Amino acid sequence: MHRLTSDVDFFARSAVQVAADLIGADFTVSGVGGTIVETEAYLPDDAASHSFAGTTARNRAMFGPPAHAYIYLSYGLHWCLNFVCLPGSAVLIRAIEPRWGIDTMRARRGVREERLLCSGPGRVGQALAISRELDGLPLGEDPFRLTLPSTKPPLAAGIRVGITKAVEQPWRFGLAGSSFVSRKF
């Protein structure tokens, strides 16, 4: 594995490619996190993307530079974490296999079972203490740490979940066989 400190080139590509390549990467926020096991890609011309209708105060980070965080509040309840790719595109982090700071995650989530700590974007947000204050911050700087895998893990791919538009796009990726994904492939 190598540490990704400010590799804008990795993120300055199609979010679909980045979403697949993030599977198996280790990610932490202030030392709490684990291995990314599920992602979804969103593109500018994608009706399900927050960027589809253009720039707003909420999605401004999506139109900023690659390799930055895009954070949004889902249904007024859950902060969700995305990695910005090309302008107007991002990768939603849907699930992480917990590895570091598990007791901290349990306290934040009020859940004991490891599999349920980060299996879904809202759970990821709560377990990693994602908040609006992280929106627009560079992924190569504190509090973030992202380490890409040195070899490609086995991937599963399928349609995105939890959306009502452009549902047919096969832009959801996961670690094949992982029990930590939010939904089976």
Image: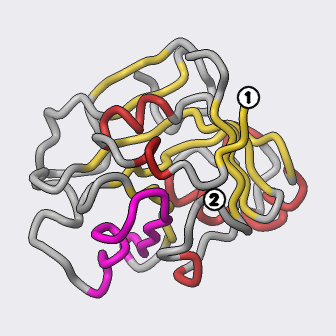
Q: Which residues are magenta?
A: 57-75
Where does the image place residue 141, in percent across and percent down from the top left?
68, 65
Check disc 2 and give the amino acid type: Gly
- Give the crowd class for mark 1: few <14, some 14-19, many >=20 residues within 10 Å: few
**117 over 155 or under it: above or below:** below
Give the Cα separation between the discs numbered 1 and 2: 15 Å
- From the viewer's perspective, is 162 left or right of 46? right
Name the outermost residue toward the bottom. 57
For disc 1, the marked residue is 1
Q: Quadrant of residue 160?
A: top left
- Give the crowd class for mark 2: few <14, some 14-19, many >=20 residues within 10 Å: some
Considering the numbered disc 1 on the image, is that residue within a helix, a strand or a loop? Answer: loop
Residue at point 31%, 78% (across, down): 60
Residue at point 41%, 29% (across, down): 173
For disc 2, the marked residue is 140
Q: Quadrant of residue 144?
A: bottom right
Quadrant of image for the C terminus: top left
Residue at point 73%, 68% (across, down): 142
Where does the image place residue 77, in percent across and percent down from the top left?
47, 75
Where does the image place residue 83, in percent across and percent down from the top left?
46, 56
Residue 29 drawn in magenta: no
Front in this rendered view, residue 149 or 170? 149
- From the viewer's perspective, is 158 left or right of 155? left
Q: Quadrant of residue 107?
A: bottom right
